Image: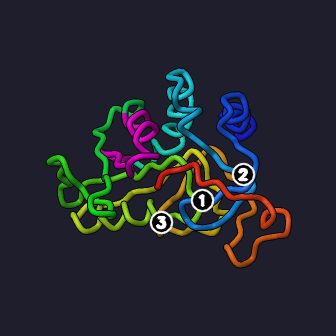
Amino acid sequence: MNQAEVLQIFRDSGALLEGHFVLRSGLHSRQFFQCALALQQMPVVERLGAGLAARVRPLAATTVIAPAMGGLVIGQEVARQLGLRFIFVEKENGLLVLRRGFKIAPGEKILVVEDVVTKGGRMQETLDIVKQHGGQIVGTAAIVDRSNGTVDFGVPFLSLLALQVEAFETDKLPPDLAATPAVKPGSK
């Protein structure tokens, strides 16, 4: 699966939005990837999951972990495609935590999967949790890397789509965005 095919899936499903958006990272952008719109169709989930699984297979993970909500669907599908265990972290009192009786064994080889990465905050929170529980992080993966190559998790980071997407701090908005009301369509 190449980048053009992934981008076409987002366009066809209406998951690539244009306008003025506030991202979870706090940055502002003209584009927003609403992965949930693309991932509501199981054939799309299977196709994107297969593409990501093929990229991460050499990392030899034994478990896939994903942050809720965005990473749940694609994380579980990557794990299914690879025949691995799948667990997730979720918010509790505003912070991501490992719950529901999930355990990470010391040295367990963990792959962290997310839907979209901009600054990598959720990914880093998840990595920190894995480390706290003694897991060995073998890599990270996302459907969309919109970080412009700026994130570094200290382990391999693989994606299906890497884009140079403009993102702006609130106090550095270009005039056209400053004049347009911002929308925050993603996870809170």
Instruction: Name the residue carrying label 1.
Output: 23
Query: Which sits earlier in the primary sequence, circle 1 or circle 2?
Result: 1
Graded by Cα atoms within 10 Å as few (under 14), some (14 to 19) or many (20 or more), the crowding at tag 1 reads many
Viewer-side residue, 171 vs 59 = 171
The amino acid type found where label 3 is placed reads Gly
Mark 3 element type: helix
Residue 188: x and y in percent read: 46, 56
As measured in the structure, the alpha-carbon distance from the residue carrying label 1 to the one carrying label 2 is 10 Å
In contact (CB < 8 Å): disc 1 and disc 2: no
As measured in the structure, the alpha-carbon distance from the residue carrying label 3 to the one carrying label 1 is 11 Å
Q: Is residue 164 visible?
A: no
Query: Which sits earlier in the primary sequence, circle 3 or circle 1?
Result: 1
The circle drawn on residue 121 is 3
Q: Is residue 114 left or right of residue 176?
A: left
Chain part drawn in magenta: 60-79
- Above/below status of 18 relative to 188: above
Instruction: Name the residue carrying label 2.
Output: 31
Mark 1 element type: loop
Residue placed furthest toward the left: 101
* Residue 83, quarter of the rendered image: top left
The amino acid type found where label 1 is placed reads Leu
Residue 52: x and y in percent read: 53, 40
The amino acid type found where label 2 is placed reads Gln
In contact (CB < 8 Å): disc 3 and disc 2: no
Residue 171: x and y in percent read: 70, 78
The circle drawn on residue 49 is none
